[in-house]
């Protein structure tokens, strides 16, 4: 039996000879490439076109380096001035006391940053199996994912789990083989495991440069240069240098392999090879275009490498997110039935001590404005009192959320994970008519189920596997306990509360001891 003395503690988780054509593609002059700092002002995210937005989730097995990679992205994008480290307990996305004490991510955290004239909305997710529901909730709000592997461990148990979750949401993804600074790191081994364990076509767009047993840089296969990061400024700047002949030949071989794989999937690239009668004269931009097209169709998985902790490879990964993962308007076509009217989905509900319940909403069409009246597909009316741009556990109030973006809303009292929210009832019915013209006479009570079957917005909730009994310190706290449990269940649907008639105890079920 678990005694919870202060009842408010129940509100857990608050928080050698190279053909000329290939040489033209591969060899470039060495240049110093400083980062482009993007200091977009407050509110700029609301005016960005959808094509310049990326909504991504960071997935990995526990200790794969998700949070460290996220911290590097924020640092290089100019959102933080100090490199956050998990072992120092000063990261942006691991803000809970329990997270900093244990050095793991417990609750998913949303942050946004600007990079190369794009806005990236990023969700850092837990890697522990006990918090798999956090991953499930996050995937409902993103358009693509970056799956991180430990270069010394390869594809691990939770990697398979999160990969399956991303498959269920039909999300394009990139792979970042992290921790390549380790002596035991094996990039080729990771590629083999990706294909054998996950059944995917892994396309390595980079090769490691190892000097004296250490990761010294990265070879960009498409451009045929070596990229080296400056250690003096935490990798803020990097430079490119020409490849040695042996390296150039290896890059050439890799490029041939990539083109060969892609030509079997992309008609445009295949036609270009036929017309030029050789792979040597294929333009690099055509290869990149084929990579993007095949990634969006989930035919291939581009693979990158580096060491987030050693400040190697992260900026190229950020560039790849923009190049190869989809913009919001390249997915979610099903929501076109709503036209320009507002429609969104609640991906998560959290509780803030000052603001109360907050609903994380992904807007698919239209704009959600402060003060707006909305309804859920269940027919419940709600009012949007305030809207916030999330920054982990901090919030900046904004006036609206435009299509393709995510934000937090204060005001809704009954929303739960998976809820479809729209402007009004007529919008729901008009959308249903476009989806299923034969269901014109459907009853109001059936709209939710019909839309759910069409839009697949029901959340997959895993069954509980670990249980414990729970009781208040005295009977006078029973009502408060029940209210707290309801709020916790609203935040985390994988927590199950039941009453055992035999033992006359309240039983709390979850994904594991750590979860509870």
Image (cartoon, rainbow, N blue to C red):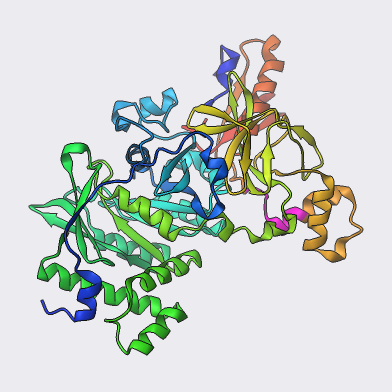
Task: Say which residue appears at 36% left-offset and 42% top-offset.
Answer: 73
Q: Position of residue 434 (x, y in %)?
A: 79, 62
Is residue 418 visible to the viewer in this orientation of the structure? no
Q: Observer-nearest residue: 28 or 273?
A: 28
Q: Is residue 264 left or right of residue 493?
A: left
Write down the quadrant of residue 28 in the picture.
bottom left
Up the image or down, 477 lies above or below 234; here it is: above
Region of the chain picked out in magenta, as a range: 451-459
Q: Position of residue 417 (x, y in %)?
A: 65, 40
Q: Position of residue 334 (x, y in %)?
A: 68, 60
Up the image or down, 227 lies above or below 358; here it is: below
Q: Observer-nearest residue: 196 or 227?
A: 227
Task: Say which residue appears at 36% left-offset and 66% top-offset.
Answer: 202
Residue 238: within the magenta? no
Task: Say which residue appears at 51% left-offset and 67% top-offset.
Answer: 297
Q: Is residue 356 left or right of residue 227?
A: right
Is residue 48 visible to the viewer in this orientation of the structure? yes
Quadrant in the picture for the N terminus: top right
Q: Position of residue 505 (x, y in %)?
A: 66, 24
Judged from this view, the residue extending furthest toward the right is 441
Q: Observer-nearest residue: 163 or 317?
A: 317
Residue 452: within the magenta? yes
Q: Observer-nearest residue: 186 or 172?
A: 172
């Amino acid at each position: 039996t678990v005694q919870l003395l202060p009842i408010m503690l129940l509100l857990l988780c608050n928080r050698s000879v190279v053909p000329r054509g290939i040489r033209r593609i591969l060899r470039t002059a060495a240049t110093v490439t400083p980062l482009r700092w993007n200091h977009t002002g407050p509110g700029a995210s609301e005016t960005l076109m959808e094509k310049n937005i990326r909504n991504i989730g960071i997935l990995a097995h526990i200790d794969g380096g998700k949070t460290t990679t996220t911290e590097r992205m924020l640092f290089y994008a100019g959102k933080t001035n100090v490199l956050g480290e998990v072992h120092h307990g000063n990261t942006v996305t691991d803000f809970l006391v329990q997270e900093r004490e244990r050095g793991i991510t417990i609750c998913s955290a949303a942050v946004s940053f600007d990079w190369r004239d794009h806005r990236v909305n990023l969700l850092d997710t837990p890697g522990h199996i006990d918090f798999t529901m956090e991953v499930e909730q996050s995937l409902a709000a993103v358009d693509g994912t970056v799956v991180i592997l430990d270069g010394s461990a390869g594809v691990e148990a939770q990697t398979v789990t999160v990969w399956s979750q991303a498959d269920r949401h039909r999300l394009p993804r990139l792979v970042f083989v992290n921790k390549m600074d380790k002596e035991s790191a094996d990039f080729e081994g990771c590629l083999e495991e990706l294909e054998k364990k996950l059944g995917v076509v892994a396309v390595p767009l980079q090769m490691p440069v190892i000097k004296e047993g250490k990761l010294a840089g990265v070879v960009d296969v498409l451009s045929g240069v070596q990229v080296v990061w400056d250690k003096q400024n935490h990798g803020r700047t990097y430079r490119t240098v020409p490849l040695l002949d042996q390296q150039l030949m290896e890059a050439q071989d890799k490029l041939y392999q990539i083109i060969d794989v892609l030509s079997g999937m992309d008609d445009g690239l295949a036609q270009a090879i036929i017309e030029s009668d050789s792979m040597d004269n294929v333009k690099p931009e055509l290869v990149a275009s084929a990579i993007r097209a095949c990634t969006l169709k989930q035919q291939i998985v581009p693979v990158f490498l580096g060491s987030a902790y050693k400040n190697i490879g992260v900026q190229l990964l950020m560039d790849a997110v923009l190049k190869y993962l989809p913009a919001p308007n390249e997915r979610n076509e099903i929501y076109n039935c709503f036209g320009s009217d507002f429609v969104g989905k609640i991906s998560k509900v959290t509780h803030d001590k000052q603001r109360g319940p907050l609903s994380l909403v992904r807007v698919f069409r239209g704009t959600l404005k402060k003060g707006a009246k909305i309804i859920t597909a269940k027919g419940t009316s709600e009012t949007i009192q305030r809207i916030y741009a999330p920054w982990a556990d901090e919030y900046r109030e904004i006036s609206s959320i435009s299509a393709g973006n995510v934000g937090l809303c204060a005001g809704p009292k009954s929303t739960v994970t998976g809820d479809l929210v729209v402007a009004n009832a007529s919008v729901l019915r008009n959308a249903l008519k476009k989806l299923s013209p034969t269901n014109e006479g459907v009853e109001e009570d059936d709209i939710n189920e019909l839309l759910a079957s069409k839009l697949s917005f029901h959340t997959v909730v895993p069954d509980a596997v670990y249980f414990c009994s729970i009781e208040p310190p005295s009977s006078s706290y029973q009502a408060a306990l029940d209210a707290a449990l309801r709020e916790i269940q609203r935040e985390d649907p994988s927590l199950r509360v039941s009453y055992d008639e035999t033992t006359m105890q309240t039983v709390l079920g979850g994904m594991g001891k750590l979860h509870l």
